[in-house]
């Protein structure tokens, strides 16, 4: 082999690892959320020539991330996780720390989006929903949700304590700002379950996020708790389902990087793009989850803003899901709820 071909071969060999590392594995929950991320983030990232993305869907199983990190065989680079998991995983050392100087100014983001191990990517809400074709008078409070004389029919509720005990206290007159303070006491928890018992005969439980809109369309329930993105998806399919935002419970999903990802720099570039105002505004146009970068709101028209948990009108009486409360008391409340539901 002459010197020139040899040098070219060496150069090609040196470049191979770099080429291999230009593919990023991004993991999310799929569905309408995954489709919106594909359009707003993944396609934009690839068009910019920054790297190729391999999208992967999962069900939030943190055990898989833990196994990768502990065996030092990390194949996922960026993973979408829910708020309890960003805290737990950070405490357990499963995630890389975020270099915020490479993501954006912390001041531009909702305070809850700024985490040492994660970047909040969107705000979603558990809300009250109803079928406007079947219910001519709109419910406006959680008191209305409990009022089976004024609004006859079944109520859809998630099978679990989370959200339901908070909604029960609101229905019983507790102000949004005081819900967790009251719920943290024995009397407050008793009060929540007493209120739930008032409605028990009229509850139809749901376990999957796709069920509430199905219940409403079929007329199985007159109103239901629901994830706002699921109602948005049904609206885009032409269903006349509506949301009452009063007392909705909002939460965030976060981007994290599993500890030991070989593509940390590229992963941060993806997170930075997905956290930019333009990309977050495009995401919000495709699914009604609120941007965490406040500068994205100015890029959205009134029609889109009307459907977002983070718009001023919808967030004025919202309650942020308290991950620390549920980490401390969630197990006991869930056990109590399971026993109560089985009675």
Image (cartoon, rainbow, N blue to C red):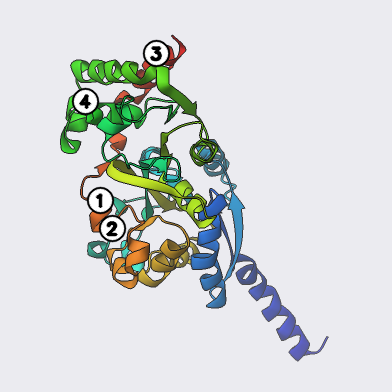
Q: Which residue is drawn at 67% across and 80% down?
A: 11
Mark 1 crowd level (few <14, some 14–19, many ≥20, 10 Å Cα): some
**Distance between the alpha carbons at the discs numbered 3 and 4:** 19 Å
Mark 1 or mark 4: whose residue is earlier in sequence:
4
Circles 1 and 4: CB distance less than 8 Å? no
Examine the rendered structure and indicate whether residue 188 appears above or below residue 117: above
Q: Tell which of 17 and 63 is nearer to you.
A: 63
**Distance between the alpha carbons at the discs numbered 1 and 4:** 21 Å
**Distance between the alpha carbons at the discs numbered 2 and 4:** 26 Å
Circles 2 and 1: CB distance less than 8 Å? yes
Query: Taking the image as drawn, is residue 260 in sight?
Result: no
- Mark number, residue 33: none
Q: Residue at x 51, y 60 (%)?
A: 36
Residue position marked by numbered label 4 in the rendering: 172
Q: Where is residue 38 in the image (x, y as percent from the top left)?
A: 55, 63
Mark 1 or mark 3: whose residue is earlier in sequence:
1
Residue position marked by numbered label 2 in the rendering: 311
Q: Where is residue 301 in the image (x, y as percent from the top left)?
A: 34, 70
| In the image, farthest residue toward the right | 1
Kind of element beneath mark 3: helix
Q: Position of residue 240 (x, y in %)?
A: 46, 50
Residue position marked by numbered label 1 in the rendering: 315
Q: Residue at x 45, y 68 (%)?
A: 269
Mark 4 crowd level (few <14, some 14–19, many ≥20, 10 Å Cα): some
Judge left or right: residue 47 versus residue 187: right
**Distance between the alpha carbons at the discs numbered 1 and 3:** 32 Å
Residue position marked by numbered label 3 in the rendering: 340
Mark 3 crowd level (few <14, some 14–19, many ≥20, 10 Å Cα): some
Mark 2 or mark 4: whose residue is earlier in sequence:
4
> For residue 184, which quarter of the picture?
top left
In this rendering, the label closer to the viewer, 3 or 4: 4
């Amino acid at each position: 082999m002459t010197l020139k071909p040899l040098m070219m071969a060496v150069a090609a060999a040196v470049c191979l690892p770099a080429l291999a590392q230009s593919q990023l594995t991004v993991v999310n929950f799929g569905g309408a959320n995954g489709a919106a991320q594909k359009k707003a983030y993944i396609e934009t990232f690839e068009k910019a020539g920054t790297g190729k993305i391999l999208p992967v869907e999962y069900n939030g199983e943190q055990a898989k991330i833990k196994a990768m990190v502990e065996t030092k065989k990390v194949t996922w680079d960026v993973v979408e996780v829910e708020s309890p998991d960003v805290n737990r995983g950070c405490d357990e050392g499963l995630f890389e720390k975020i270099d915020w100087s490479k993501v954006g100014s912390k001041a531009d983001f909702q305070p809850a989006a700024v985490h040492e191990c994660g970047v909040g990517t969107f705000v979603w809400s558990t809300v009250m929903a109803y079928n406007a074709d079947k219910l001519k008078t709109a419910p406006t409070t959680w008191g209305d949700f409990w009022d089976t004389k004024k609004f006859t029919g079944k109520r859809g509720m998630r099978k679990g304590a989370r959200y339901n005990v908070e909604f029960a206290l609101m229905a019983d007159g507790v102000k949004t700002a005081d819900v967790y303070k009251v719920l943290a006491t024995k009397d407050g928890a008793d009060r929540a379950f007493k209120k739930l018992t008032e409605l028990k005969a009229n509850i139809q439980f749901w376990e999957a996020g796709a069920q509430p809109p199905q219940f409403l369309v079929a007329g199985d329930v007159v109103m239901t708790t629901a994830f706002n993105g699921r109602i948005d998806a049904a609206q885009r399919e032409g269903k006349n389902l509506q949301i009452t935002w009063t007392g909705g419970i909002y939460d965030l999903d976060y981007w994290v990087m599993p500890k030991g990802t070989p593509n940390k720099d590229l992963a941060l570039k993806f997170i930075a793009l997905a956290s930019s105002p333009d990309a977050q505004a495009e995401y919000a146009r495709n699914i009604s989850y609120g941007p965490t970068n406040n500068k994205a709101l100015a890029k959205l028209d009134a029609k889109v803003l009307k459907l977002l948990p983070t718009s001023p009108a919808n967030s004025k009486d919202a309650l942020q899901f308290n991950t620390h409360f549920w980490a401390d008391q969630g197990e006991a409340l869930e056990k109590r709820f399971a026993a109560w539901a089985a009675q």
